[in-house]
Amino acid sequence: MKTLLKSVSVAALGLAASAGIATAQDDQLKIGMTFQEMNNPYFVSMQEALMQAADAIGAEVIVTDAGHDVAKQISDVEDMLQQDIDILLLNPTDSAGIEAAVRMAKEAGVIVVAVDANANGPVDTFVGSKNRDAGYLSCQYLAEAMGGEGEVAILDGIPVVPILQRVEGCKAALDEAPGITLVDTQNGRQDRSVALGVVENMIQAHPNLGGIFSVNDGGAMGALAAIQGSGKDILLTSVDGAPEAVAAIAQGTPFIETTAQFPRDQVRVGLGMALAQYWGARVVPSEVPIDVRVVDADNAEGFSW
C-alpha cells in the first residue's frame, strides 16, 4: 500500500511539474488554502511548503487564517470562491461545521482536499498524519520510560478529530500498561500559557504524578515550564515535532519525546492529489495517511520538519 501511495504521489507531482508550463501560457491556476490557525509553527511551515510548491508550478495562492472560528472559515471559503479558485486546500477548524463550505466549493466545480484534519462532506481527498498512531507511540514511550508504573495525566486540547485521535491512541497505549494509572485529563487548549496554569494545578492536585502526555508541542512547552517550576521528577511526552520541542528534548529536560508529524509533506502530497485530479486523473486515493516518527534524545539533534 505504501508503494502504491508513493507511486500515486510521485505521478501527481510529476504531472504538476510538467503542467506548470501550460499554466504559464493559459489561465493561471489559482489555489486557495484556509488554515484553522496560523499562530503555530506547524501551520507556518505548512504554508511555506505550499508557497514553494505553488511557485514551482506558477500558481497563484490565496491563504486565510480562521483563528479557530468556523463561521470565519466558511466566509473565507466563500470569498475564495468569488475569486474563482480552482483548488481548495482545507485545514478545517471544525470538521462537521465546515461541511457547508465543502458543498459550496464542490457545487462551484472546485477540487477540495482536506489537509491535516478531515472535513465532512464531499471532500475529494484527505491527507493527514496517523494521529492515533502518534498518540499511541508517545504514551507507549512514556509508560516505558516510567518503568510501567505510576500516575499519568493527559493535557488535552481543542476537540478536533486529530486531537481526539491522539488521545484515543494514548489511552490505548496506557491500557496496555497495567501499572500505569491515568489520574487526570484537562484541556490546555494547545496553548503554552493556558497549559502552564493547567499543569500547575495538575501537579498540585496529584502529588505522585509521574508523567504527562500533551496532545501538541505548544501545550507541552507550557507543561515543561510548570514541571521545571515544581522541581518534581515528572516526565513529559507530546505530538508534533516542533523545533522548540525538539531542542528541549535534545537538551535533556523532562520533555523526553515527541512523535513528529510532517506538515510540509502533508501539504505537498495534498497539492499533488489535487493537481492530479485537476489535470485529468480519474482515480485518486480518497485518503493518504502520512507516517509519524518518534523523536527522542537519540535523534532529536538532527531532526527538523
Image (cartoon, helix red, strand yellow):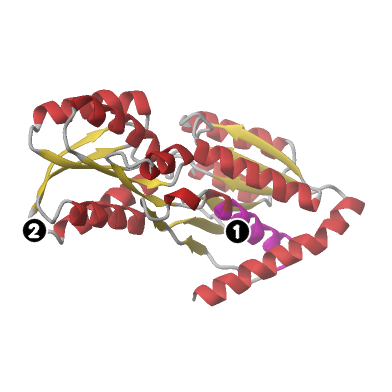
What residue lies at 9% left-to-right and 52% top-to-bottom?
Answer: 149
Check if mark 1's residue and mark 2's residue have beta carbons within 8 Å.
no
Mark 2 is surrounded, within 10 Å at the Cα level, by few (under 14), some (14 to 19) or many (20 or more) other residues, namely: few
Mark 1 is surrounded, within 10 Å at the Cα level, by few (under 14), some (14 to 19) or many (20 or more) other residues, namely: many
The amino acid type found where label 2 is placed reads: Pro
Judge whether 229 appears above or below 302 on screen. above
Give the image location of residue 167, x and y in percent: 27, 48
Q: Main secondary structure of the magenta part?
A: helix
Depth check: 118 or 38 in front? 38
Judge whether 70 appears above or below 286 on screen. above
* Residue 25 among those drawn in magenta: no
Q: Can you see residue 140?
A: yes
The amino acid type found where label 1 is placed reads: Val
What residue lies at 66% left-to-right and 46% top-to-bottom?
Answer: 50
Query: Could you say whether the residue bearing mark 2 is in a helix, strand or loop?
Result: loop
Query: Could you say whether the residue bearing mark 1 is in a helix, strand or loop?
Result: helix
* Residues shaded magenta: 265-281
Depth check: 276 or 147 in front? 147
Which numbered disc flags the more N-terminal residue, 1 or 2? 2
Give the image location of residue 152, x and y in percent: 15, 44
Q: CA distance from mark 1 to mark 2?
A: 39 Å
Picture quadrant where residue 193 is located? top left
The residue carrying mark 1 is 269
